[in-house]
Image (cartoon, rainbow, N blue to C red):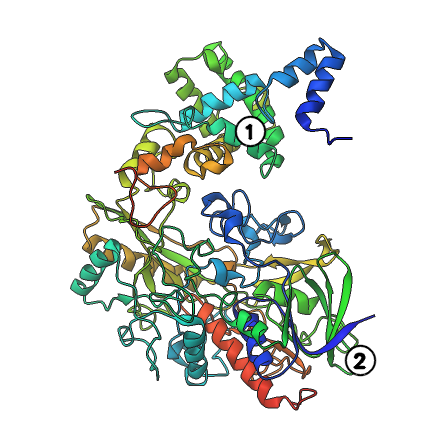
Amino acid sequence: MSLKRVNAVVVGAGAGGGVVAKELSEAGLSVVLLERGGWPNFEAHDHDELISQRVTVLGNAFGPDDRRHRRVVSNGNGGWRVVVPSDGAYNNNAACVGSGTVSYGAMAWRFMEKDFKLRTTYRSVAGSTLEDWPITYQDLAPFYEKAEWEIGVAGETGADPFAAPRRQPYPMPPFPHNQEGLVLEKAAQELGLHPFPIPMLRNSVPYRGRPACIKCRYCVGFACEVNAKCGTHNTVIPAALATGNCQVRTESVVSEVVIDDRGRACGVRYFDAENRLQYQTADLVVVSASATETARLLLNSQSKLFPNGAGNRHDWVGRNLQGHAYTGAFGLFEEDRYDDVGAGATIAICDYNHGNPGMVGGGMLANEFIRLPYLFSGIRPPGAASWGRDHKEFQRKYFRRCVRVVGPVQEMPVFEARVEVDPVVKDDWGIPVARISGSRHPNDIEVGNFLAAKAEAWLKKAGAFQTWQTGAGRGVSGGQHQAGTCRMGNDPKTSVTNPHGQVHDIDNLFIADGSLHVTNGGFNPALTIMALGYWVSDYIKRGWKGSRFRS
Amino acid sequence: MPKCSRRHFVKALAVGVGGSPLLSVFAATPWRYFTVAEAERVDALCEQMVPGDEDPGAHDARVVRFIDQQLRGPYRQHQADYRKGLMGVDETSRELFARGFLELSWEEQTEVMRALESGKAKGNTWKNQSASAFFNLVRNHALQGFYGSPRHGGNRGYASYRMLGLDYPQIIGQNRYR
């Protein structure tokens, strides 16, 4: 028996799905938004460093839990191991309404114009499936703008000389620099670089009924205590609910998109909060479950016309898994640089995103979010003690005198870096789990080392008396910035969806999350995922005929 | 019938079984997982990891309580590592100094720690368990208990937050330690 049919079912209430739910329900469609987790609850874990989304030694603050969820990852030697969500190798994204937008650092980047045209800019790269996006920055710009105004971004309009053109200013003024930012700003200017305040999905002033940030020590990894951080859980999803057309069903774990013999999506099967299998039929299905889970769901959705999974006729689902290698440097200072003003990251440069001599791509560099005491206990220069008196002395002396500059490398997509479905291992509901394997492209390591050297030079100029670089390993990417597994494109043979997120050959199945990214930018991807949510929704709304979707 | 709490249950058992030595040991231990002897060793290991100086160390911050609690929770899978590893620590101590870990001087204990860390520690236990892996496990747990939130049983009196001058809870516009 199936549940009452709706117009649209959206799988995953994160950066992409939250936006889609709002856009479609405001357009008059009846929408069910399914989320495997619950509503986020700040009080449950408070400012507990050991149960956050950043340090997970006692678990993930916003799920998923270790008891019911698992994945299989390659150990690099042809073997596999089972991992739980609190293990870093799991490549977790928060499982709650809002997902990563609850606990992120909230950097609000628009990708640059060249980020959509890497193949044209750099030509082909050996060992990479590098390609241009089928859409341009200009296509996405109005939807970036919508995300900035509806969800809320604080930034300094025009401060980044490398940024793509924009029509509207940021809706909120930028955050002032903390002490680290002031010191780094001066040094960057002396180096001829172009520093500017990081645009943030966080209220610098009261905005749309929520208060301004109080600049506490805890931000990235935590829910906001005063609700000043802007996620989909406190903006677009409440707006969707306010239309009366949208229902959010939490603790709902989707196992399959049901595709009929004619190749149309009929709805989804999911396990509800009481673990009962439900069948929600719908006129159209939007999957926005993050790059790993979206690929897993499509691969687990086998049908007569698509025996290898929905949209997987040409074996592109789950391919090109990307994230961000984070490289940079630490610097120690003679005087305090820590002023206990959060969130910590205030200043960035985009001087090295493109045009680096002899290199493909690059990345943004910024000062790092506040490193809380346990996380800092793992930060030491090479060769320093990792325990005992000297370790404690370092903690006491340098907790307030250590600055990090770091940034995300724009990764080269690799066909063999992939999400599959494990043939044996299942989760608590009996659904085959995601299996992750592959490795980073050598270019990512090279560009990462280049960025680390630039970060170190910046810290030295700022007065650091000792510095050390941190590079990237070859291990498979993914993490919270996971992307690329259901690439959009014009050619059905080399992509999973068309330029509007519509799965090739399944007209009423859409994807709206980071899976669509052809390349992942040298930036945190959240704002781009939100913009894609608006972009895909716009296409659906234009094709919506009141009772069903026509392409 | 009123609900029977764990305390009542233990009490009733103790009365009922009388002088069973096993049970009296069980009832007397303040620990959730460790035996009293194990807890003493973990306490000493952790103090080596984060020694007391002008600021409290792992002992004063009750890091052993943190680890003991987590071994009944998120660290459940490490119970056996501790049980076996702690035997190994005493074996290494006897190999090096002919005495158990708790009977050693501070400097001698530090030497045992170095042997464990390097993975070259001697002792039967380390023939099928990695000494350095056990060392790293205890170090990570000790640092978590010392620098993490006091709500989990360690970092008593906000010891590490005080050391770093971090107000906890952080109240914007107010500074309690300075």
- The amino acid type, in three-letter code, at marker 2 is Asp
x, y percent for residue A543: 61, 89
Q: Which residue, as the protein is rendered here, is positioned at the far left?
A: A190
**For residue A20, side relative to residue A280 (left or right):** left
On what subunit does the disc labeled 2 rest? Answer: A
**Which disc, if any, is residue A261?**
2
The answer to whether B155 is drawn above or below residue A428 in the figure is: above
**For residue A458, side relative to residue A375 (left or right):** left
> How many tags in the picture?
2
Q: Name the residue beneath numbered marker 1.
A: B68
The one of B167 and A458 positioned closer to us in this rendering: B167
Secondary element under disc 1, as helix, strand or loop, is helix
Q: Which residue, as the protein is rendered here, is positioned at the far front?
A: B1
The answer to whether B115 is drawn above or below residue A427 in the figure is: above
The answer to whether B91 is drawn above or below residue A86 in the figure is: above
The answer to whether A288 is drawn above or below residue A376 in the figure is: below
Q: CA distance from mark 1 to mark 2?
A: 57 Å
Can residue A54 be seen from the camera position used here?
Answer: yes
**For residue B133, side relative to residue A28 (left or right):** left
On what subunit does the disc labeled 1 rest? Answer: B
For marks 1 and 2, give the one nearer the viewer.
Answer: 1
The quarter of the image holding the N terminus of chain B is top right
Tell me if mark 2 has few (under 14), some (14-19) or many (20+) residues whose alpha carbon lies within 10 angstroms of its own: few
In the figure, residue A419 lies in which quadrant?
bottom right
Secondary element under disc 2, as helix, strand or loop, is loop
x, y percent for residue A466: 24, 45
The one of A68 and B61 positioned closer to us in this rendering: B61
